Image (spheres, rainbow, N blue to C red):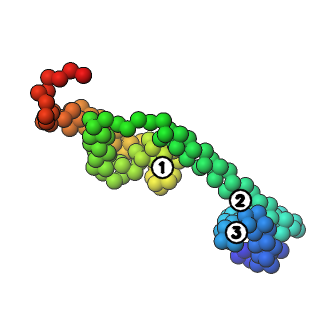
């Protein structure tokens, strides 16, 4: 694409790529996105192109693989959403104490320093490995592990502090408080 590889004429293949992408996804906007993704991958992997091979076949293969990757991603996301919907349907609304506790914990999480919060979020909520999270943040793995450890330590301290204690300053209105149910 930058003219360094002889016989690497991508521009001449755009029409064919667009037609193939449109036949795969049946949506002009998605087809353009798919062609774009395929061209980015082709550019990144230009060194793997064998001189003398068919650029068209190589690009079509990349386009096809990009399409398959998108389908897999979409199916995986749909499965996660379906599983979450099933859990939501089966769950019981939390009682007031639990709701208060979750709000307190959420506030404690958001009170963490940004670098600790983003590290903990990627590892604990998004379930990225330490290596993946470190790459995402552009930091060494050791730094990430340190941030996660400090964030967890702060949340444990929150759990053990008075902030985690049940709310006792509320009183029952309209009752004596000694009703047993």
**116 up-or-down from 21: above or below:** above
Residue 87 screen position, x and y as percent: 50, 38
Q: Are marks 2 and 3 in contact (CB under 8 Å)?
A: no
- Residue at horizontal 67 percent and vertical 67 percent from the top: 30
**The N terminus lies in quadrant:** bottom right
According to the picture, the residue beneath numbered tag 1 turns out to be: 134
According to the picture, the residue beneath numbered tag 3 turns out to be: 27
Marks counted in the figure total 3
Assign a secondary structure to mark 1. helix
Residue 111 screen position, x and y as percent: 27, 49
Neighbor class of circle 2 (other Cα within 10 Å; few <14, some 14-19, many 20+) is some
Q: Is residue 79 among what the camera can see?
A: yes
Residue at the far top: name it: 180
- Residue at horizontal 77 percent and vertical 60 percent from the top: 64
Q: Is residue 142 among what the camera can see?
A: no
Neighbor class of circle 3 (other Cα within 10 Å; few <14, some 14-19, many 20+) is few
Q: Earlier in the sequence, mark 3 or mark 1?
A: 3
- Work out how far the residue at label 3 is from the one at label 1, CA to CA, in angstroms: 36 Å
- Work out how far the residue at label 2 is from the one at label 3, CA to CA, in angstroms: 16 Å
Neighbor class of circle 1 (other Cα within 10 Å; few <14, some 14-19, many 20+) is many
According to the picture, the residue beneath numbered tag 2 turns out to be: 66
Q: Nearer the viewer, residue 129 or 170?
A: 170
Assign a secondary structure to mark 2. helix
Q: Earlier in the sequence, mark 2 or mark 1?
A: 2
Residue 88 screen position, x and y as percent: 47, 41
- Work out how far the residue at label 2 is from the one at label 1, CA to CA, in angstroms: 25 Å
**98 up-or-down from 120: above or below:** above
């Amino acid at each position: 694409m930058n003219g360094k590889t002889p016989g690497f004429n991508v521009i001449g293949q755009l029409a064919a790529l667009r037609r193939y992408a449109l036949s795969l996804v049946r949506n002009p906007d998605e087809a353009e996105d798919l062609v774009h993704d395929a061209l980015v991958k082709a550019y990144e992997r230009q060194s793997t192109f064998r001189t003398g091979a068919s650029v068209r076949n190589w690009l079509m293969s990349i386009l096809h693989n990009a399409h398959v990757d998108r389908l897999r991603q979409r199916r995986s996301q749909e499965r996660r959403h379906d599983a979450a919907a099933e859990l939501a349907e089966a769950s019981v609304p939390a009682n007031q104490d639990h709701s208060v506790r979750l709000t307190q914990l959420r506030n404690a999480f958001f009170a963490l320093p940004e670098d600790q919060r983003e590290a903990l979020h990627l590892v604990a909520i998004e379930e990225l490995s330490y290596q993946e999270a470190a790459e995402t943040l552009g930091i060494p793995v050791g730094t990430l592990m340190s941030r996660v450890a400090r964030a967890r330590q702060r949340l444990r301290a929150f759990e053990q502090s008075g902030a985690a204690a049940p709310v006792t300053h509320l009183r029952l209105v309209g009752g004596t408080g000694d009703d047993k149910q």
